[in-house]
Amino acid sequence: MNLKELMKNELNEKELLLLKRSFDQVGSVAQIEIPKELIGKEKVIAKKILETYKNINTVVKKDDITLGEYRIRPVKILAGEKTTIALHKENGIFLNLDLNKVFFTPRLSNERLRVLGLIRKNDFVADLFCGVGPYAILIAKFSKARKVLANDLNPDAYKYLLENVKKNKVEKKIECFNKDANDFKRLSADKVIMNIPKFSESFLKTAFNNCKKGGRVFYYCFARDEELKERINEIKKAGDCRILKKVKCGDIGPGAYRWCIDFKKL
């Protein structure tokens, strides 16, 4: 049952047209997006979700914008338990996090599995904007990578990263850092994950500097379909490479998408 179907007896036709069909679930927390026209109905919607889904204990509303260098999208509690902390299970790993202190989206679950499938035996993987560890921990737990470097500048994300590394019992395979990604030089990694789409162009040199020759970079960015060629040109200007794949990883607004551009450093 989608959100529109759930609310068909609570909202009129005009209101239903404004409502999104789905919501994100992080652990036992439901995250909904409420257009400004429906703000007066937000608690009715939240209460209905809480009544219907027994595995949801809290309903929060996402803010309209992502704030600051830590890419945090604040949430407001609408119903249920008064907490923004969640224990999220995804792809066989557990992630503890606070939605008001770190960036996390469950919408990249399948994308993270795609990246996992491209990790080879004895690879050195550098995840330079790792957040609470969804890529790094997944790779450490289920691949034959030799080593995983996980870094995030946000001290709260780093705190949860350390907790999650222990929770998933991958301490021997992951090295964790709380640094600016630009501080890393010549890591010579086989795979480099650059999941910072809002500021991606600013870190292209970092991607090239830390990837070995012949290595693969997973470079995330925001773009409309017609802007994708421009993003690719930015990559090619930053260093010698070959584009391997362009993956659309979900929409971020009308006509705008999150992309992963995989490229090989030559």
Image (tube, grey):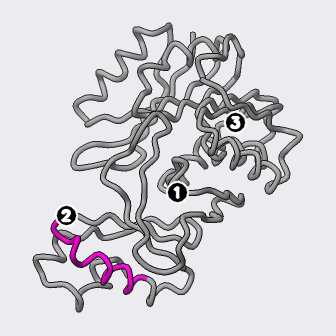
Label located before the other in sequence (2 or 3): 2
Q: Nearer the viewer, residue 157 or 198?
A: 157
The percent coordinates of residue 8 (x first, y second) are 23, 87
Magenta stretch in the rendered image: 36-49
In the image, what residue occupies the spot 51% across and 23% down? 263
Element marked by disc 2? helix
The percent coordinates of residue 14 (x first, y second) are 10, 76
Q: Nearer the viewer, residue 5 or 198?
A: 198
The percent coordinates of residue 53 (x first, y second) are 49, 84
Residue 166 vs 207, above or below: the answer is below
Amino acid type indicated by mark 3: Ile
Label located before the other in sequence (3 or 1): 1
Point out which mark residue 99 bears: 1
The percent coordinates of residue 169 (x first, y second) are 85, 52
| 81 to the left or right of 93 | left
Q: Does the magenta portion include 38? A: yes
Element marked by disc 1? loop
Q: Does the magenta portion include 173? A: no
Name the residue beneath numbered marker 3: 119
Disc 3 vs disc 1: which is toward the camera?
Answer: 1
Element marked by disc 3? loop
